[in-house]
């Protein structure tokens, strides 16, 4: 806008604009008030309903006991460290493996048929196999083979089982993302002389991955929760720690504590990815949205 | 605008101002489009033509001023934008057809869902319009299988299907080759003959000269010059207008 520099802006908001903005503010204020009142009313009603229900006293004793919550917390937090380690390591491996599988499945040409077939078979099998069977098979089955040099550490084996199953899920998410990139994008990249691999790396994948961030996160959260399943092999994680406490005291507050910690872990992750996606969208588009 | 004095203009802009951040895109724009007339907006890319059209269709909120459709202030926050958009047809530069629907479904979507026309009736009207624009055999096709000119004609049919009071055309030939340009502009010419009120942002100066009743030259968000095609193209007063038109003349496109 060259004129902008030449001519000083003498703009003063008109009466009309001031009136409009006043109306918009009033409308927003009204909406906020209605929202606040209805939220409070709903919350009050629900709380009243729960507290006045006949079993409330016993429920509170068994599930929401402050003393038990405090007593079980240290052990649960100790166990949680294992869940976090598993989640980070498995998450990273799953993302890499899933992406590799997805890309392998999109390879064209007869040369790649064995690879493609292998990737397809892998995804078909491990996506369909119940996680619990995979876990039992790996965690108890593999040590029974008494193979030399193969670990019997339940954490490593449990993590392997998680990776086997989740990389199949994640591969399908990535593949769906790759398929949604319009063919014209590939055509544009290839016509610039980029090779098939370069096109995948620089044009297709960046768009595909961006699109599948929300479902990907879904799988990662699910993975995070399923790290609790390694407790079946005897590794003491947050879930097992809670179980031990509950077994000793016959009070189930420890489960609630462990559960809430898992919930609390996933929420910041969701908000973070939402923020990242929103920022990327803002950067790429200009102007208003309808 | 001599014939607009007795009747209410279909579209009227009054001191419209629009900013994106600190950039003023439209500054104090006044414009009046009488019924059954064609207004051409010309000017360099980035001069505000598209933004003006987007504002008129309420796809963008304006900062100040007002826009009137048939005398009603549509920029009043109390007005429901959906009811306004129902009365305006828009054709975009990139067609913006829905790739997951057939041509017929693209066209009948709004009549059926918004205007509550029965499916058979909407389809019949769509086929009629398609036939009139030479696309009678394309109803069952998907947009990506059509040529650019065909897609753009479908987009025009889609905009017309809601029987709008006003048609906004945003550089609708910018993505087409000369032969297809002629094909699409022929359609616009026919629409003018049928009395459709239109605002056209265009780089086709020859076409603007031929079809427009009023030409506005936009530069850096202001209407620098306006008048009949004869005035603006024949004897432009502003230095900037002259320079802009000279570039087209040099390229042999005037």
Image (cartoon, rainbow, N blue to C red):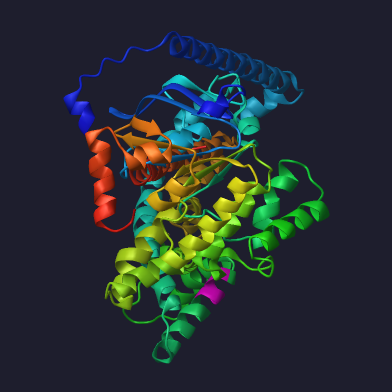
* Image-based side of A180 in relation to A272, left or right: right
Q: Residue A235 location in percent, x, y?
A: 43, 56
- Residue B198 picture location, percent across and down: 55, 40
Say which quarter of the image contains residue A114: bottom left
In the image, residue A64 lies at what x, y percent? 58, 28
Query: With respect to residue B122, does B21 lie above or below?
Result: above
Which region shows up in magenta? A123-127
Disc count in the image?
0
Q: Is residue A257 magenta?
A: no
Q: Between residue B40 and residue B20, name the one nearer to us.
A: B40
> Residue, x 64% and y 20% (percent of image)?
A43
Instruction: State the predominant SS element of the stretch in magenta.
Output: helix
Is B188 above or below relative to B232? below
- Quadrant showing the N terminus of chain A: top left
The picture places residue B34, in percent across and down from the top left corner, at 56, 30
What residue appears at the point 42 percent right and 87 percent down from the top-left corner? A109
Residue A125 highlighted magenta (yes or no): yes
Q: Using the rendered image of the protein, determine whether residue B250 is visible from the camera's viewpoint.
A: yes
- Residue at horizontal 40 percent and vertical 52 percent from the top: B206
- Where, by quadrant of the figure, is residue A199 drawn? bottom left
Q: Is residue A152 visible?
A: no
- Residue ranking furthest to the bottom: A111
B116 versus B109 height, above or below: above
Image position of B137 (left or right of A121): right
- Between A256 and B167, the one lying in front of the other is B167
Residue at point 56% right, 70% down?
A: B145
């Amino acid at each position: 806008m060259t004129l902008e520099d030449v001519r000083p802006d003498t703009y003063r908001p008109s009466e009309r604009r001031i009136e409009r903005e006043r109306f918009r503010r009033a409308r927003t204020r009204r909406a906020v008030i209605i929202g606040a009142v209805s939220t409070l009313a709903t919350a009050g009603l629900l709380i009243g309903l729960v507290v006045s229900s006949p079993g409330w006293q016993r429920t509170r004793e068994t599930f929401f006991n402050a003393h038990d919550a405090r007593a079980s917390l240290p052990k649960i937090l100790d166990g949680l460290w294992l869940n976090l380690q598993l989640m980070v390591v498995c998450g990273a491996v799953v993302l890499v493996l899933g992406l590799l599988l997805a890309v392998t499945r999109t390879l064209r040409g007869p040369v790649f048929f064995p690879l493609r077939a292998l990737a397809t078979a892998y995804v078909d099998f491990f996506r369909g196999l119940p996680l619990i069977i995979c876990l039992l098979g790996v965690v108890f089955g593999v040590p029974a083979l008494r193979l030399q040099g193969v670990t019997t550490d339940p954490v490593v084996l449990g993590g392997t089982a998680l990776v086997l199953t989740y990389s199949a899920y994640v591969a399908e998410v990535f593949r769906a993302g790759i398929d949604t990139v319009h063919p014209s994008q590939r055509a544009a990249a290839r016509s610039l002389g980029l090779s098939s691999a370069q096109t995948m790396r620089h044009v297709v994948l960046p768009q595909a991955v961006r699109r599948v961030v929300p479902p990907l996160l879904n799988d990662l959260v699910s993975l995070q929760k399923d790290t609790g399943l390694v407790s079946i092999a005897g590794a003491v994680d947050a879930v097992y720690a809670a179980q031990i406490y509950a077994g000793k005291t016959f009070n189930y507050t420890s489960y609630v504590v462990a559960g809430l910690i898992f919930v609390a872990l996933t929420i910041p992750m969701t908000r973070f990815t939402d923020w990242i996606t929103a920022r990327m969208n803002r950067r790429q588009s200009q102007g208003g949205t309808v | 605008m001599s014939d607009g004095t007795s009747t209410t203009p279909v579209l009227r802009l009054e001191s419209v101002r629009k900013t994106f951040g600190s950039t003023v895109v439209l500054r104090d724009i006044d414009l009046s489009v009488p019924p059954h007339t064609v207004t051409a907006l010309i000017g360099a890319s980035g001069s505000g033509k598209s933004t003006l059209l987007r504002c008129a269709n309420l796809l963008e909120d304006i900062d100040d001023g007002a826009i009137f459709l048939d005398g009603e202030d549509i920029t009043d926050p109390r007005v429901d934008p959906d009811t306004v958009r129902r009365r305006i047809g828009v054709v975009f530069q990139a067609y913006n057809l829905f790739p997951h629907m057939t041509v017929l479904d693209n066209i009948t979507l709004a009549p059926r869902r918004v205007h509550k026309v029965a499916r058979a009736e909407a389809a019949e009207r769509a086929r009629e319009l398609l036939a009139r624009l030479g696309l009678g055999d394309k109803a069952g096709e998907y947009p990506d299988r059509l040529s650019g000119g065909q897609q753009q004609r479908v987009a025009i049919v889609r905009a017309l299907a809601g029987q709008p009071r006003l048609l906004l055309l945003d550089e609708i030939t910018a993505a087409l080759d000369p032969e297809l340009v002629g094909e699409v502009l022929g359609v616009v010419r026919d629409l003018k003959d049928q009395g459709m009120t239109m605002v056209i942002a265009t780089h086709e100066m020859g076409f603007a000269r031929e079809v427009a009743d009023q030409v506005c030259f936009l530069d850096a968000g202001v209407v620098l010059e306006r008048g009949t095609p004869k005035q603006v193209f024949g004897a432009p007063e502003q230095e900037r207008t002259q320079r802009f038109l000279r570039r087209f003349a040099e390229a042999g496109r005037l």
